[in-house]
Image (spheres, grey):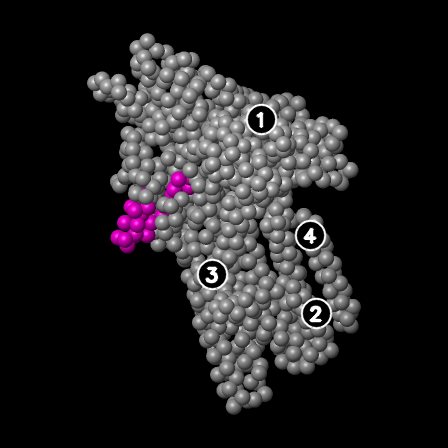
Amino acid sequence: MAAEAYAAATACFHCGLPIPPGPPILVEILGEDRDMCCNGCRAVAELLVNQGLSDWYTRREQATGVPGSVLEDLYADTTLLDEEVFEDEFITTGTHDGAAATLLVDGIHCAACVWVIERHLLTLDGVHDVRVNLATHRAHIEWDPLKTGLRELVIGLATIGFEARPDRPGEAAAIDLRDHRSALIRIAVAGFATMNVMTYSVALYAGEFEGMAAGYQALMRWAGLLVSTPVLLYSARPFFSAAIRDLRLARPGMDVPVALAIGGAYGVSSYATWTGTGEVYFDSVCMFTFLLSVGRYIEMRIRHRTTSLTRDMVDATPLIARRENNGLEEIVRAEALAVGDLFRVRPGETVPADGFIQEGTSSVEEALLTGEAWPRAIEEGSNVIAGSVNIESPLLVEATRVGNATTLARIASLIDRAQAHRPRVAHLADRVATIFVSCVLAIAAVNAVAWSIIDPERAIWTTLAVLVATCPCALSLATPAALAAATDGFARAGLLITKGRFFEKLDEIDCFVFDKTGTLTRGETRVASTVPFPGHQVEDALEIARVLESDSEHPVARAFIPSPSGRYSTSDRAQKMRGNHLHSTPGSGVEGTVDGTRYRIGRPEWVRGSNLGPPLGEPDSAHSWILLGSEHGLVAWFGIEDSIREDASSTLQELTTHDVALELLSGDPSQSGRAVAQTLDFSTARFGVTPEGKVARVQELQAEGKRVAVVGDGINDAPLLNAADVSIAMGSGCDLSRLGADAVLMHDDLTLLPRAIDGARRVRRVVMQNFAWAIGYNAIALPLAVTGHLSPWLAAIGMSTSSLVVVLNALRLRQPGRGGTRSSEGRGATIP
Amino acid sequence: MTILIVLIPLGLVMLGVAIAAFAWAASNGQFDDLEGEGSRILFDDDEPARPKRSPTDSPRKTR
């Protein structure tokens, strides 16, 4: 709370964006006047307060309301929701005899968002029931179709700042859900069984000492057999199928000894139960399966979280298409398009299928696919791909690939496959396991031969004791438990780790390379200063610049447009009416006519063009300066600033204490880049580096034997991220290229970087401790088992304790480090 | 100790009931969202949609 109140002076209390200069916009929330960045945010905030929902501000974890200025866009997008095609596909019959639908809601960050969405929608007329799932960002809504409709619901969500679209239930998501549920049931079966079998085992062990009637002993054993059978057949099935797959591929991993131990212990115990001889190990079977299933479950949850994020992103392809039918436009589901169909795409809409342009000249933004934010110019005959956004003028497109054949859909399925087949986390453990299991088998064989010479009757029991006592439980849990606990801890804090070897590799990093724009800076440019030439007004100059830049997606252009989404809002479109012949020259600037006068805005040399006079000095060196000039003369200088993230400086200082070198690679050649490097105290910094140059520099560092971690915003750093040993992408970059990264900073919180290094070191320490413990346990248990001194209760206690110690030791990693200001108090005070 | 002959099968029946109940709950989506539901109990204390809340009665608890 306190931190948010302080931050209110510089950042919007509602959305967290910087507050532009000018008269303050205030809303009274929770008894205090809070600063807002724009009237849109004020409207949202006042709505929340008036509905008695202002508690959202105390309950949310970050100041991350969707900026009010984006809302206009949202309203414009919803007009199509009334179309009938939506009803067929998305609306089902609810339990209250009404309509029901599932919406995918963007911008849900914490439980407070769940609360505010449910509360707000229930106040709408006709809404029966709302259930929001925080994990999947989906809201299930049931309503009375006579009183309200899908469009009203989406608008209702938009008024409180959440963007929603109807959810197209995908096959992959359904498989994830089924996996999740069956994994839970497997754990439950193993867990409940363990509790029961333990009671029988305690009785049996007590019977060893106190004596026990043979009949009761048999009863306990049969009960144990009965309870462990579903554990073996149901809960442990994934281990057996994985072991069989490993053996087929001739690459025995940890699953082989695991399956061997579970299967062996169960087989021996049931034989002993059947014949009434020897020892039973049912408790080991159940407990071992339970602990391992829990470990696998945590691993699976993390994998699902990463894949569902990517899936939601790819789902951005539009749901409907405007098909051209004998000169008439009809609205159909995107899936209904066939190859050869003609369809229209209006400006601002997303292309529903791959195709080539039949008619029209425009530009498309393909950031989702290429990561390039700059729009690509297209004309008749050019190809467009599904998922790209049409920017300028209407297009008529002939479909060449539709549905699951589009480039985007194929990329999505590639991602799914890559994630499903990604190597399991336990590399070291797998190597150890292969050696370990061969050793155990060899020792067991030698043991069997030796005992059959000494005492043939005890041979089989001692051999089985060797197999069970040296059960690889602790060993196989050593690494995965530690990694799962640490990954989960960091995922909660906002660092999503997508590759299993992240910690292993991060621990060896010598050098951190940072990108500037969007990583160390916010990537949200703003006009920090305007210096008009004599005879011109600041407001007029800004207005002209806004009109000229309204067409451009360049970061500099966004400085003039108050919409942080970088898309057009209706007001910008209205302004564009007054600007004609807008034409941008990449790398230089924009040219166009505003109210009959030709203007140029951009790099000073380009704006002045042939009108060469004495070179102009820029007003100062604190900003990057761009020039606005007309055919009549120069109009104004604009100083563009990209503010540095609050946490950048402290993060970098902390990183230097972790023995890593820091380097800045910036594509920006301007003065402001140098200013950033100076403020942040970089010893090595390069400016104006091309993407290829960045990759070359990383490879140069690697050739020097250094291990390089790259932190980038993922938008234009994809090749760079791929070249690095460890790559970390900023979560705000919303495109496919960030999927290549080893980890994603979900809330752009840089302070997690030093904590991740600490985390990696702690993971290594914990894994080593676990290995030491597991190997130590086996070193003691094995001789005892071989010499026939290990009774089953001792073996079971030893095995359980060794596994539990390993798991508990690993669970210490769920606290992702005692980092900075964010203590156990939680993330409530975070300023994004 | 003959009671064990009754108690152990009884325990097994209860085990079966427990597993069946859990499996039913899991397959009906009771465990689909393990993050948000934990906080829900804190929210339900408040009245829904009350017009204009005075600053003094706004609960200061976080999350």
| Outermost residue to the left | A614
Residue at figure coordinates x 32%, y 34% from the top left: A668
Amino acid residing under circle 2: Leu
Q: Quadrant of residue A242?
A: bottom right
Residue A226, numbered circle? 2
The relative height of residue A345 versus residue A467 in the rendered view (above or below) is: above
| Outermost residue to the bottom | A453
Residue A426, numbered circle? 3
Real-space Cα separation, disc 2 to disc 3, in angstroms? 33 Å
The relative height of residue A786 versus residue A142 in the rendered view (above or below) is: below
Residue at figure coordinates x 66%, y 73% from the top left: A204
Residue at figure coordinates x 76%, y 67% from the top left: B9
Rate crowding at label 3 as few (under 14), some (14 to 19) or many (20 or more) other CA atoms within 10 Å.
many
Between disc 2 and disc 1, the foreground one is: 1
Real-space Cα separation, disc 2 to disc 4, in angstroms? 24 Å
x, y percent for residue B51: 66, 23
Please name whichever residue, A52 or A516, is drawn nearer the observer in this view of the structure. A516
SS under mark 2:
helix
Are the two marked residues, 2 and 4, in contact with CB atoms closer than 8 angstroms?
Answer: no
Rate crowding at label 4 as few (under 14), some (14 to 19) or many (20 or more) other CA atoms within 10 Å.
some
Q: Label 1, on which residue?
A: A76
Can you see residue A801?
A: no
Q: The disc numbered 3 marks a residue on which chain?
A: A
SS under mark 3:
loop
SS under mark 4:
helix
The relative height of residue A642 versus residue A662 in the rendered view (above or below) is: above
Q: Is A554 included in the stretch rendered in magenta?
A: no
Rate crowding at label 2 as few (under 14), some (14 to 19) or many (20 or more) other CA atoms within 10 Å.
some
SS under mark 1:
helix
Between disc 2 and disc 4, the foreground one is: 4
The residues colored magenta run A694-717
Amino acid residing under circle 3: Ala
